[in-house]
Image (spheres, rainbow, N blue to C red):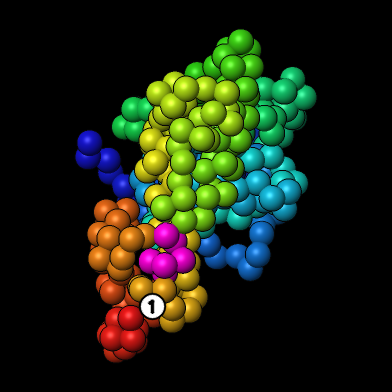
Amino acid sequence: MDLNIETRQLHYTSAKSPIGFVEWSCIYQDSHWNFEGMRTLDLYAMSYILEGRCRYTDPDGLELFLESGDLLFCAPGSRNRMEPAPGRQFSEVWVTFGGPIFDLWRDAKLLSHSKMLLHLEPLDYWLGRFEGLFEGNRDQIQLVSAVQALLADMLPSDQSWQSNVEDREWLGMAKKLLTSVERAEDLDLVGIATEMNMSYSSFRRKFTALSHISPGRYHMTMLIERACQWMSESHITNKEIAERCGFCNEFHFSQRFKQIVGVPPREFRRRAHGNEAVARTIDAAG
C-alpha cells in the first residue's frame, strides 16, 4: 500500500461557529514529542496512526502501544504523552475540534474514556476520509457536520461497544501477564492461557485477533523495547542485556533485536548515541 505520508498541514483556523469548530489538522511524518512531561489538551483530539509504533501514557498509569490503523480519542482536560516506542518512529493524522455539539457526544457517552481506542482499516480509505474533510472551501458549520459524519462512521453500535470494552479489558489483563515475564526463557504461554481460563489455542487466537500480533511476538517485542531503552540511556553491553532478558546467548539476542527493530544493536547504539566510537567501544566490552 502506497500511502502519501509527508508532514503537511491539512487545516487551521481560529474561526468558530455557535455549535462547534474544527481548529487544526495535520499529517505528521516521523512524529516526535515536543513537550516536557505530559501535555494537557484544551480540545477534543483524534490521532490516527498511519505507520510505525507509538507509546501512549497518562497520569493514571495507563500505557498503550499504538500501531498503524489505531485511532485514539482524547477529551478536553486530559493529560497524556505520545512518543515513538523505543527504537521506533510513527506517523499520524492529528485533528483537534471542540464546541457544544461535541460536548453532547461526550455527555451521551459516544466519546468517553472507555471508547478512546479503535482500530480502523484499510489505511488508505481512512486517510482519504481525513483528507476529504478539508477539501473545498467549507465553513465551520460544514466542517463540524463533516467531522460528526466521520465519527458516526467510525463508531460501532452500542452492542459492539460493550463487546469492545470487554475485549479491551481482557486484552489488558493478558498483556499485563505477558509483560510481567521479564526473561525470554521464563515465558510459559500455556500457563498464562490457563490463568486466563482458556486453552492455549483459544488464547493465542483471541489475543492475535484483538492485538494483530501473536502473544509470543508481543512478549518478544516488549523485551526488545526494554533493551532499546537500556541501550539509549546507558552503556550496558549486549551480553549483559542478553543475560537480563533471558536469551540463551548474545547472538540469539542480536538476531531477535534485528527482527523487531530492523537494524542490529550496534547500528541502534550508533543512532541513539550519535557516535560510532561509542558503539564500537561497547561492542568490544561485551
Q: Amino acid at mark 1?
A: Thr
Would residue 72 be found to the left or right of residue 48 on screen? right
Percent position of residue 205, x then y: 40, 24
Q: Quadrant of the C terminus?
A: bottom left
Which residue occupies 67% across, 57% down? 39
Which residue is at the front of the view, 125 or 286? 286
Answer with the quarter of the image where residue 110 lies: top right
Which residue occupies 65% across, 64% down? 37
Kind of element beneath mark 1: loop
**In the image, is residue 78 part of the stretch drawn in magenta?**
no
- Is 286 above or below relative to 86? below
Percent position of residue 283, x then y: 30, 81
Would residue 191 be found to the left or right of residue 277 on screen? right
Which residue occupies 51% across, 35% down? 191
- Residue 145 visible at all: no
Mark 1 nearby-residue class (10 Å; few <14, some 14–19, many ≥20): some
Which residue is at the front of the view, 70 or 132? 70
Would residue 180 be found to the left or right of residue 238 on screen? right
Which residue is at the front of the view, 272 or 44? 272
- Is 181 above or below relative to 152? below
Q: Which residue is mark 1?
A: 237
Q: Main secondary structure of the magenta part?
A: helix
| Residues rendered magenta in the picture | 241-246
- Is 245 above or below relative to 136? below
Percent position of residue 253, x then y: 32, 62
- Residue 182 visible at all: yes
